[in-house]
Amino acid sequence: MDVEALAAAAIYLFSTYNYFFNVYKKKVIKRKWRRRRWWMLTIHRNRTKQTMDNQLAEMLAEPSGEFDNFVRMSNSDFEF
C-alpha cells in the first residue's frame, strides 16, 4: 500500500468512527425521559395515617380484591 491509500483508509476509518460515535451520542442525549407513572391503592397511600383496623376495613371495601391478596384467606375465614 502506498502512502496515499493508507492516508485515505485512515481518514475513512476516522470519519466513520466519528460519525457513528456522534450519532450514538445524539441518540443518548436526545432521548426524552418520560415521567414515571406509579399507581397505588388508597390503603397503601395512607398507611402512615391509619391504624391496622381501619386498613383492614378499607381493604374489605376495595374492589380490587386486595383483602384476599393481603390476608391470603377468604372473608368468612378471617372473621372466625
Image (tube, grey):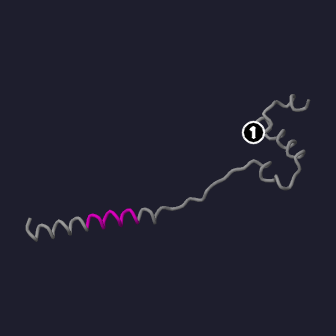
Q: Nearer the viewer, residue 4 or 75?
A: 4
**Side (left or right) of 37 relative to 13:** right
Question: Which percent across, then down, holds residue 51?
Answer: 89, 50
Location of residue 34 by image quarter: bottom right
62 vs 72, nearest the viewer? 72
**Given the current orientation, which residue lies at the most extreme left position?**
2
Magenta residues span 15-25
What residue type is disc 1 on? Ser
Which quadrant, please, contains the N terminus?
bottom left
Q: Name the residue under label 1.
A: 64
The residue depicted at 48 percent of the width and 61 percent of the height is 31
Q: Is residue 20 magenta?
A: yes
Please identify the quarter of the rendering in which residue 67 is found: top right
Residue at the image point whose x is 17% and y is 65% from the top = 9
Residue 8, position as x, y percentages in the image: 15, 68
Task: Kindly state the secondary structure of the residue where label 1 is placed.
Answer: loop
